[in-house]
């Protein structure tokens, strides 16, 4: 993929993804998704993240790009945006060394919290896939996070939202995003060809769970729930060894 495609992709992403949107989502309880975190920047919800051990979480690298760890914290164990649960400040922040803000490739980062997560019915780690675990087209996954329920709305939901989406064919995903240079082996698409269900930037970094595993991290896309432009996710299975190398998880 050439640099002009990278630049075009970054421009479109930055311009067309409003903060905090899960189009077509319904309210959910944190007890059903106890790995879900709210990554807060300057005390406000900024992105999603997922618990992977008692002191490590994973999010999207673009969520923490050029952001000091002193400005970040995560909220665990709460269904509510900005309220309840436990607060954990960030001790260590590790973005993938090959992350590129223009191509949004290798869009993954690790967060080590300064105070461990205390596991309960509302706080639990999510299982990780094995390295290069196959992600089969049509597999249904569930994405969660906080946001508005309709594209164009201004006020984000105070409640955790959930949305079920199918993993899409890799070839079709590349066709859909050909004008932006396609997708890399570290990415996959999930959603419906007719649109109507999708996530947007406010849920970046959040989990896409399938069969109890963290298979995807909300990464990028064009608009929200727009036909022909499904959501693009970081493919966690391809980066499993990197997670283990830097976190020990």
Image (cartoon, rainbow, N blue to C red):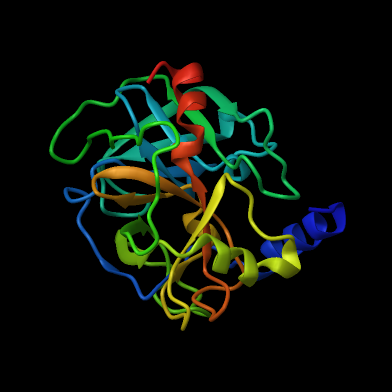
Q: Is residue 226 above or below residue 42?
A: below
Instruction: Determine the residue positioned at 48% across, 25% down.
Output: 241
Instruction: Determine the residue positioned at 29% across, 40% down.
Output: 35
**127 sits left or right of 187 in the view:** left
Residue 184's x, y, as percent?
Answer: 63, 50
Q: Is residue 141 above or below residue 198?
A: above
Residue 183's x, y, as percent?
Answer: 64, 56
**115 sits left or right of 27 in the view:** right
Q: Is residue 190 above or below residue 80?
A: below
Q: Is there any visible trace of residue 72 in the rendered image? A: yes
Q: Residue furthest left?
A: 121
Viewer-proximal residue among 180 and 91 = 180
Residue 4's x, y, as percent?
Answer: 86, 58
Residue 58's x, y, as percent?
Answer: 45, 35
Viewer-proximal residue among 79 and 169 = 169
Q: Quadrant of residue 105?
A: top right
Q: Is there any visible trace of residue 45 in the rendered image? A: no
**103 sits left or right of 212 in the view:** right
Instruction: Determine the residue positioned at 37% across, 32% down.
Output: 130
**120 sits left or right of 171 in the view:** left
Instruction: Determine the residue positioned at 81% across, 57% down.
Output: 7
Q: Is residue 105 above or below residue 114?
A: below
Viewer-proximal residue among 159 and 207 = 207
């Amino acid at each position: 993929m050439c640099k002009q495609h990278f630049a075009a992709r970054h421009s479109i992403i930055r311009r067309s993804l409003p903060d905090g949107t899960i189009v077509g989502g319904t309210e959910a309880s944190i007890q059903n998704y106890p790995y879900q975190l709210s990554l807060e920047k300057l005390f406000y919800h900024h992105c999603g993240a997922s618990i992977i051990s008692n002191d490590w979480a994973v999010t999207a690298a673009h969520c923490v790009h050029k952001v000091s760890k002193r400005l970040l914290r995560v909220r665990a164990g709460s269904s509510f945006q900005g309220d309840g649960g436990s607060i954990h400040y960030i001790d260590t922040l590790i973005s993938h060394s090959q992350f590129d803000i223009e191509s949004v490739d290798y869009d993954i980062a690790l967060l080590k919290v300064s105070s461990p997560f205390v596991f309960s019915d509302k706080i639990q780690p999510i299982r990780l896939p094995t390295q290069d675990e196959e992600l089969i087209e049509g597999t249904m996954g569930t994405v969660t996070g906080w946001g508005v329920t309709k594209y164009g709305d201004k006020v984000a939901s105070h409640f955790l939202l959930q949305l079920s989406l199918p993993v899409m064919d890799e070839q079709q995903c590349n066709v859909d995003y050909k004008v932006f240079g396609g997708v890399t082996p570290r990415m996959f698409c999930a959603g419906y060809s007719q649109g109507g269900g999708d996530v947007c930037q406010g849920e970046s970094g959040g989990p896409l769970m399938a069969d109890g595993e963290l298979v995807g991290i909300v990464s990028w896309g064009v608009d929200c729930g727009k036909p022909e432009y499904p959501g693009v996710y970081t493919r966690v299975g391809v980066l499993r060894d990197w997670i283990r190398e830097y976190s020990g998880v």
